[in-house]
Amino acid sequence: QFPSHQASQAQLRTAVCPTTSGQPQSRQAPAPRRPSTFQEKWWTVGTLIQPPQISEGRAMFLTKCAACAADCTTVKACSRCQTVYCSVQCQKTHWESGHDKLCKMIKKKGGAEQLYADKQYKASIKLAVEKCAKDARSQALLNAAKQLGDLSFCDMEERKRFLELSAEDAEIEEDEVTCYICLDSIHSETKEGVVRGCGCKGSQGHAHVTCLAKQAQLSVEEGETMNADDMSARWSKWTRCGICEQNYRSLVSCALGWACWRTYVQRPMEAPAKRAALTTLGSGLMDGDRAGEALTVFQAQLKHAYKEQDEESITAAKGNCAMCLSNLGRDAEAVVINRELYAQIRKASGLEDIDTLVAALTLAKSLRALSSFSEARALLREVVPVAMTSLGGDHGVTLELNSNFVRAMCMDLNATADQLKAAVDLAHSTHEAALRRYGDGHELTHLCRASLADARVVAQNAGLER
């Protein structure tokens, strides 16, 4: 089956988390016993009081009138190209002002929603390539600076010249990087450069987003044709590197999310592939710091989960919505959902289960954002030892739990000297574990390093560390 209910991979690691053995472990919401009659109502927090205004057709992101830009409470679409309007009058006005000349072209390209997805996909590729190129140059400069050693004997001009030469070397190295799929540095058709948003090191893992998307698409299509039993593994090619088996992150994940959505947007919402693509897109948007758009996606996911009375999908969709609310600064709403989900998942799966530990992590983040430090510490004090035992100290979830424990201790104005010392020690060991497992450039290592820096600053201000 397609992983249509899998939770988002962004930040909370709710899609796939690496295990201590190096093999990925699927993250899916537990399936509580389904009641004989389905009586659960729509989630009643904040904007989730009402289902999102999305038609049963193809409208997903295009919910503003093409003529007047007003929100469409009821979507009326052009019968040919699916461009949406708020009224018949707006549709007539838009047609007379030039839409009649564009309508056939839009339909030829797949319709308004398809055209929008294609544009977002191209834009996201450009952003991902630019960011990866910038990161590669920065890392090459750092490596070159380390090799140069001590430049204190040089004057300012000599130091500048050394760095300029290092920059030139970095650009040469960048030009030599090729896609491991097509073996070209520049894609022959799209002319895009390579990206690498996983955990690969050295020269491994570079690829074109277009090549990664095509590889995933062909694998899924083959599985659909053969009615294969490994559809979840095939679908993971949209979200996970086939070399290092770690999730794509940041803008690369966002670009692949749009690539996935544009591939299956033409299918009906009931199709498993489109439901899975919806979740993949939401995860990518979260990784790309586009929580507002991700919330729209996960609201749609939640709406259809309720429609099908699928409690497993409902649980995952609620968690994804809560994650979006947190990223939008609406922690008071998110914490209500996270409390319920943590209690529900813990009761169903036990404290040692990875789903429970991830739910505890999300709840701890919400509590910390609301400055409920004592409650966050109490929760983490209970679950961190369990995570260390069941997952290992270098597991992604364990590292995030420890980082949040550090922040919950050092950000509390009422923290004692012993708590601050413990926070620094824990932050140091967590950073070392992340560095060993994921390397210096991984986002988890950055997170742990930031926690260590914060803990040291607080300890220094308290006169506990020099």
Image: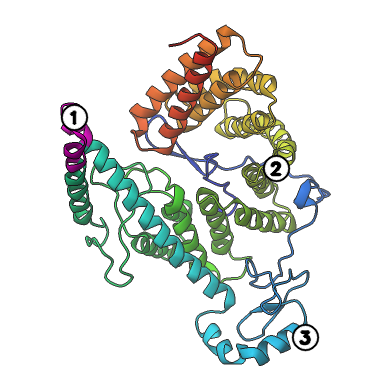
Task: Give, as a three-letter code, the residue at label 3.
Answer: Gln
| Foreground pick, 334 / 96 | 96
State the residue at coordinates (48%, 26%). 391
Q: Label 3 to label 2, Cα distance in Å?
A: 37 Å
Q: Can residue 266 be seen at all in this image of the molecule?
A: no
N-terminal of the pair, mark 2 or mark 1, is 1
Residue beneath disc 3: 89
| Foreground pick, 354 / 155 | 155
Q: Are the residues tagged 1 and 3 within 8 Å (C-beta)?
A: no
Q: Is residue 198 magenta?
A: no
> Which residues are drawn in magenta?
145-162
The picture quadrant where one finds residue 237 is bottom left
Residue beneath disc 2: 330
Residue beneath disc 1: 151
As drawn, 146 above or below 180: above
Give x and y (percent) for residue 272: 57, 61
State the residue at coordinates (52%, 12%). 422
Q: Is residue 161 magenta?
A: yes
Q: Can residue 145 be seen at all in this image of the molecule?
A: yes
As drawn, 115 above or below 428: below
Q: Label 2 to label 1, Cα distance in Å?
A: 48 Å
Q: Main secondary structure of the magenta part?
A: helix
Crowd rating for badge 3 (residues with CA inside 10 Å; few <14, some 14–19, many 20+): few
- The quarter in which the C terminus is drawn is top left
Q: Are the residues tagged 3 and 2 within 8 Å (C-beta)?
A: no
Give x and y (percent) for residue 302: 69, 53
Q: Are the residues tagged 2 and 1 within 8 Å (C-beta)?
A: no
As drawn, 202 above or below 251: above
N-terminal of the pair, mark 3 or mark 2, is 3
Q: State the SS at label 3.
A: helix
Crowd rating for badge 2 (residues with CA inside 10 Å; few <14, some 14–19, many 20+): some
Q: State the SS at label 1.
A: loop
